[in-house]
Amino acid sequence: MRERPDVITRAVEGPRFGFTITKKIGNAVTRNRIRRRLKAAFAADLKQRTLGACDYVVVARRAALDRPYALLLGDVTQAMSALQHGRPARANKKGSA
């Protein structure tokens, strides 16, 4: 998470998200599917909270491809809550995305 300077903040309201998915995870179809699932999960989570003008970079893992959407959404909610409260988000060792 990184707060944006005032100059950029005026041009773009709210948070921005960037997704990093390496080629080691799979081919383009696999990477795009993971990106779409993560974008949907973050969009659903944003409806429930108010975030400032920050930039977020999400590093995807292969587990995001097969993880049930409800659990993926729970992982996103937990991570965003931890960021909002200043706690480091810890990945669940049982296959969280």
Image (cartoon, rainbow, N blue to C red):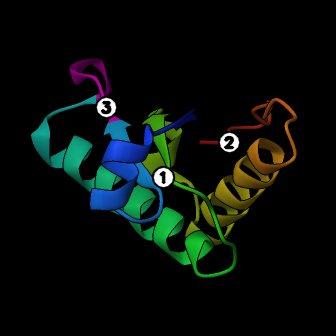
Numbered disc 2: secondary structure: loop
Residue occupied by mark 3: 21
* As drawn, 45 above or below 74: below
Residue occupied by mark 1: 66
User: Gap in Å between the C-alphas at discs 1 and 2?
Assistant: 10 Å
User: Gap in Å between the C-alphas at discs 1 and 3?
Assistant: 15 Å
First of labels 2, 3 by sequence position: 3
Callout 2: few (<14), some (14-19), or many (20+) C-alpha neighbours within 10 Å? some
Q: Where is residue 3 in the image (x, y as percent from the top left)?
A: 54, 38
Q: Residue furthest top?
A: 24
Residue displayed at 45% across by 39% down: 4
Compared across the picture, whether 93 is left or right of 30 comes to right
Q: What residue type is disc 1 on?
A: Asp
Say which quarter of the image contains residue 5. Answer: top left
Could you say which is closer to the camera, residue 33 or residue 5? 5
Q: Give the mark toward the camera: 1 or 2.
A: 2
First of labels 1, 3 by sequence position: 3
Does the magenta portion include 22?
Answer: yes
Compared across the picture, whether 30 is left or right of 67 comes to left
Numbered disc 1: secondary structure: helix
Q: Give the range drawn in magenta.
A: 20-25
